[in-house]
Amino acid sequence: MSNPLMSLAEKTAYKRNLVKIRLARFGRKHQPIFNIVVMKAKKAQQKLPMEVIGTYNPVPTPQPSFDNSAPIKDISLDFHRAKYWLGMGAEPTPKVAWLFKKAGILPNFWPKTSKLSQEINAPVVEDVKETQESPVDVVRRRGDKKF
């Protein structure tokens, strides 16, 4: 697998890439639901993952008869953890990379378009704004009344 045009850093990075971001299938027959998981590359698909960073439902939700828009496939994703694992060198599988491109996490040139059956011209998510939430007191103080 070694390419003579690869630099030494690329060769060692290829050997060190032991973590993959991939889909783990759950759900019933003809109703799949996938978890987007971070796992060691050599581990079986249904084994316990290092972290679950999202879910993907490839079956589109039914639209009302008056709505002529495209059906929606549900993707829920933890953007911060996905960016963290990509920064740590985890390699997404082609389908996960396609989902990340749809969400706007990966640029259009990632991965090579020859690996994908569909090409994305623009990400679906226009602008992701990060907000910081204020902490909420979930514990009642002694003097507070119940109602």
Image: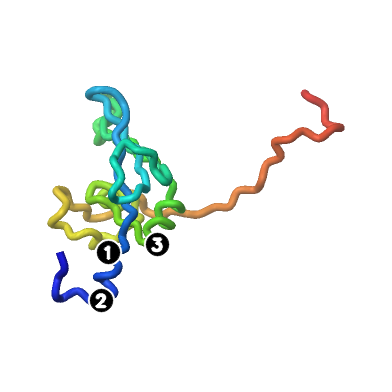
Badge 1 amino acid: Lys
Residue type at mark 3: give it.
Gly
**Residue at point 35%, 42% (across, down):** 36
Label 1 neighbour load within 10 Å: few <14, some 14-19, many 20+: few
Task: Tell me if mark 2 has few (under 14), some (14-19) or many (20+) residues whose alpha carbon lies within 10 angstroms of its own.
Answer: few
Marks 3 and 1 sit apart, C-alpha to C-alpha, by 17 Å
First along the sequence among labels 3 and 1: 1
- Where in the figure is residue 137, as x and y percent of width and height? 71, 39
The percent position of residue 110, horizontal first and vertical second, equals: 25, 60
Q: Residue furthest right?
A: 143
As drawn, 71 above or below 78: above
Element carrying mark 1: helix
Instruction: Name the mark on residue 87.
Output: 3
Question: Which of pointers 2 and 1 lies earlier in the amino acid sequence?
Answer: 2
Q: Is residue 20 visible?
A: yes
Q: Which residue is mark 1?
A: 15
Q: Is residue 120 left or right of residue 91?
A: left
CA distance separating discs 2 and 1: 11 Å
The image quadrant where one finds the N terminus is: bottom left
